[in-house]
Image: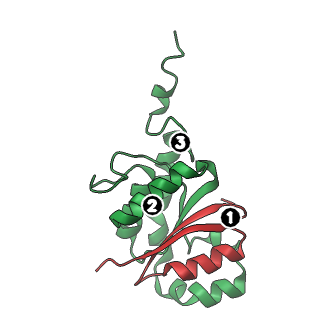
Chain colours: A green, B red
């Protein structure tokens, strides 16, 4: 992901409640989707940008996912993304997102960044077990 | 994931779906787009 965008997203994640935030992508190939999604959930895998080592755990979706499509005004949807929906392989674009969302859930669910970002479930209770 | 009332960060793609198109869709669903950028993977 663009380094400038990483910096902006980090700022926004600090400014807003993370449970109110979501990231929506428009990438056209599964590898780009996977890389961006990984960056805004688990952290920048290349460690080149502001999100390197920063697991924000933001919920991330693609605009072509049925879950989002059903909430958008059908006329607007058709006008804005209808053509690309026909051209792109939607199931393949969505697949990496499902996997990453499962990983985020395993790490503590959406909004895991509220102070316990990146901790495994078995680590989260430490300190209160004594 | 309900879009209504969400603060959305949009990362579009020039050769896919650009950010302004996603912005229009999300706004129609009641989301608040707080950041929108279109990336280019060339």
Residues under labels 3 and 1: Cα distance?
Answer: 19 Å
Give percent across and percent down for residue A93.
45, 71
- The subunit carrying tag 1 is B
Whether labels 3 and 1 share one chain: no
Q: Which numbered disc flags the more N-terminal residue, 2 or 3?
A: 2
- The subunit carrying tag 2 is A
Give percent across and percent down for residue A86.
53, 87
Is the residue A4 above or below the residue A56 in the image?
below
Q: Secondary structure at mark 3?
A: loop
| Rendering quarter of residue A65 | bottom right
**Pointers 3 and 1 in contact (CB under 8 A)?**
no
Residues under labels 2 and 1: Cα distance?
Answer: 21 Å
Neighbour tally class for label 1: few under 14, some 14-19, many 20 plus, Cα within 10 Å: many
Q: Which residue is mark 2?
A: A8
Q: Select label 2 or label 1 by which is in front.
A: 2
Give percent across and percent down for residue A1.
35, 65
Residue found at x 59% / y 64%: B8
Q: Secondary structure at mark 1?
A: loop
Q: Which residue is mark 3?
A: A112
């Amino acid at each position: 992901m663009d380094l400038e965008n990483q910096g902006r997203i980090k700022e926004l994640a600090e400014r807003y409640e993370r449970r109110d935030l979501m990231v929506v992508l428009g990438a056209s190939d599964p590898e780009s989707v996977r890389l961006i999604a990984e960056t805004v959930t688990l952290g920048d895998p290349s460690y080149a940008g502001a999100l390197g080592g920063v697991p924000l755990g933001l919920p991330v979706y693609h605009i072509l996912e049925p879950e989002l499509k059903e909430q958008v005004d059908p006329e607007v949807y058709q006008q804005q993304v209808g053509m690309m929906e026909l051209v792109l392989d939607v199931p393949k674009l969505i697949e990496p997102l499902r996997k990453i969302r499962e990983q985020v859930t395993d790490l503590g669910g959406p909004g895991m960044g509220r102070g316990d970002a990146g901790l495994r479930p078995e680590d989260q209770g430490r300190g209160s077990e004594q | 994931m309900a879009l209504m009332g969400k603060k959305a960060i949009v990362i579009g793609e020039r050769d896919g779906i650009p950010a302004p198109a996603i912005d229009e869709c999300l706004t129609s669903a009641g989301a608040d787009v707080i950041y929108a950028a279109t990336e280019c993977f060339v």
